[in-house]
Image (cartoon, coloured by chain):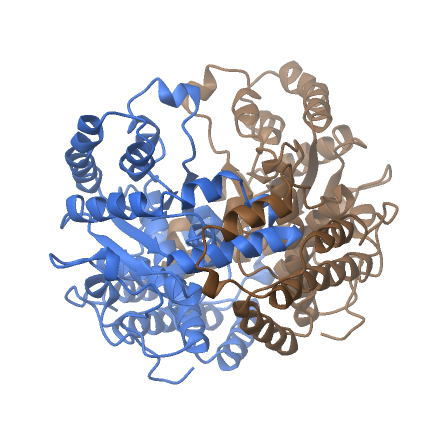
Chain colours: A brown, B blue
């Protein structure tokens, strides 16, 4: 929880497999780019999670105002690699209204009647959302290959099809973040054994898990080819060592947060005049109970303070591979231009501000600025 | 955060409108059944939220093993009543994989071509899930009535149709929890004004909000009739004072938690023999690295301890309207029968247990027992 809690290098670059990448020698218990331990990792995950949540709210607001952009997190990994834990613990930090989650299992009869990308297209995230694929179209070059569900020439053709498909998806405004969670064979064995030893985890176990485990080498080979052939610049892979769950969660949090920072979503400008709307609203309120101008201007200042805090959080801790987006201008400008129109506020705000300050004192690492409410 | 942090009476009964219920005199700043303040309310929300999350995981496990049961939270309320905040802060405490969330806005062209219940039926929760409706079929007797979108005889007929529909839904295994969030007109005015005063909240504001606010009395009348005519025993309404956001969130958390307690979901029993699977798994592991029997039996004990903790959390703080379900038998029995088969464990567990114990010490009110991973 030290102040220097940070990545030593941006994970987006670090975790992307290069031309010399060798899955066979990849250390699945390592923590690339992060020197701290589990407690540090969890603290940084929580801190960046707040920022991720704040950025997602802005993206959501953009989507509600005609924006088309979205993020798609593609989670791949063998049984026990921790995909479910990522959904629960990482995506669980974001407002459920901002998440479009889909799990892809064995195709249904209807899905089988269509091209393998049919069900994927239908599940793409709506504007403003973070889509999450728990497994994905990559199963069609993984299990489909290992279990010989289709001919070799069919799955071989799919690499190029997938690259084209992902190009189309990104061109429509979706940033794709692809993550391959890699556990060691030993760690997978231990995790399966725990599922067998704990009655409260039996439901997660399936006798087919051992059969799949026996195809370990085939899956490693299939993953190697996926990573070599679909690691495009517009939708790069990130290979994440997953023997340490806390590290995998930290890394995915950072990748998604960074994708959102790069999108740099801004609060949309209203299509109506604020002063007109305020006047109309005030006419519906009991004149005795309308907040004074001073009280209302504090509300605006509150908003500006939040923007500053947010800009600092974005500019601060993050070493970004991408050029740092110019922060603190868009939102704050909005706030200023608005402050000009109306300098007022309401009594309740005082109470809110007080409790907010208390919150901040309590939680020193809360940077993203947490809105009490949303959507 | 005192130990006696608790409801003075079960909110399920307390918040259900009786025959004498009068919406016009309903105090929307009150906190029925809860004597504490905001900090107490938040602490209890977090505590019960952990239990809610744990119970949801059991329901999810049941659903994955052939169970049909689910919960459906129906959220109704005027603009600014806090529906979005409930989704974010209450449902946000549950694993996103366990939530089926749907928002119902103005019907699309396709939806308009069908009966008003068509889109509702398609959005019912899958087995094991908590479905959340942000607005619902009740809009078809609220806005449809106030804005005269249909003839009076049409919306009048819908009360009975809705009651029949909800009967069908519950008969298929879905527990319906209906919540009407009631803000005062003054509080709504202040919340709308804040949206206008804060540029970061402009996107939540729509000029039609003031127009809708002007129909306040019509909406109150429409809500009164809804509460009188669709408050059935199988799908009762709960009217929640919503001027204090923390109270509304606390109350909804308790209602959903109680619904789950009443369902009493148990970890499903496996359809395979544990010993057989363990033997098969061990043959795939490096014999040097297999945990010892002692280590593995600690895993089982861990599981039993979690079950006990869970049973205490369920039996404890909750004053339930329903007879207390017999707890601590189902899961623990499973655990014992399993312990007989296999008495072993793994080295990693020790580390895990240690950090787990530390967690528990750190967080005294963590009762539901938090699984580190899921689904």
Instruction: Give the residue at x 36% y 84%.
Output: B3
**On the rendered image, what quadrant is the N terminus of chain B found in?**
bottom left
Residue A77 point in image, percent of width and height = 61, 43
Is residue A78 visible to us here?
yes
Q: How many marks?
A: 0
In the displayed orientation, state which residue is furthest to the left.
B19
Instruction: Give the residue at x 43% y 47%.
Output: B79
Residue A85 point in image, percent of width and height = 54, 53
Q: Foreground residue, B238 or A136? A: B238
Residue A270 point in image, percent of width and height = 65, 41
Instruction: Give the residue at x 32% y 20%.
Output: B114
Residue A256 point in image, percent of width and height = 69, 47
Q: Foreground residue, B203 or B65? A: B203
Above or below, B30 against A65 in this view is: below
Left or right of residue A118: residue B216: left
Question: Residue A172 appears in which quarter of the rendering?
Answer: top right
């Amino acid at each position: 929880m030290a102040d220097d809690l940070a990545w030593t290098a941006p994970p987006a670059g670090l975790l992307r497999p290069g031309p010399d990448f060798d899955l066979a020698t990849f250390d699945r218990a390592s923590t690339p780019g992060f020197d701290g331990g589990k407690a540090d990792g969890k603290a940084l995950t929580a801190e960046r999670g707040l920022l991720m949540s704040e950025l997602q709210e802005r993206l959501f607001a953009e989507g509600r105002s005609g924006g088309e952009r979205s993020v798609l997190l593609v989670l791949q990994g063998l049984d026990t690699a921790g995909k479910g834990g990522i959904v629960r613990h990482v995506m669980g930090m974001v407002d459920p209204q901002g998440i479009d989650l889909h799990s892809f299992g064995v195709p249904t009869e209807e899905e089988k009647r269509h091209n393998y990308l049919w069900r994927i297209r239908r599940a793409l995230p709506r504007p403003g959302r973070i889509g999450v694929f728990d497994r994905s179209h990559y199963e069609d070059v993984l299990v489909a290959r290992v279990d010989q569900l289709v001919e070799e020439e069919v799955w071989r053709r799919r690499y190029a099809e997938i690259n084209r498909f992902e190009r189309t998806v990104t061109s429509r405004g979706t940033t794709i973040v692809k993550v391959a969670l890699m556990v060691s064979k030993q760690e997978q064995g231990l995790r399966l054994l725990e599922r067998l030893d704990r009655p409260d985890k039996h439901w997660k176990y399936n006798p087919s898990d051992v059969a799949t485990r026996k195809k370990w080498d085939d899956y490693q080979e299939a993953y190697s080819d996926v990573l070599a052939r679909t690691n495009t610049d517009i939708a790069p892979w990130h290979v994440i060592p997953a023997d340490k769950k806390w590290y995998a969660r930290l890394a995915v949090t950072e990748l998604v947060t960074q994708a959102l920072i790069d999108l740099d979503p801004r609060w949309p400008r209203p299509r109506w005049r604020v002063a007109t709307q305020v006047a109309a609203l005030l006419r519906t309120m009991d004149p005795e109970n309308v907040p004074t101008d001073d009280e209302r201007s504090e509300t605006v200042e509150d908003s500006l303070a939040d923007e500053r805090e947010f800009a600092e959080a974005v500019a601060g801790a993050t070493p970004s591979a991408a050029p740092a987006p110019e922060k603190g201008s868009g939102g704050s400008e909005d706030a200023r231009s608005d402050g000009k129109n109306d300098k007022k506020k309401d009594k309740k705000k005082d109470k809110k501000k007080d409790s907010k300050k208390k919150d901040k004192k309590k939680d020193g690492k809360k940077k993203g600025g947490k809105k009490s409410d949303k959507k």
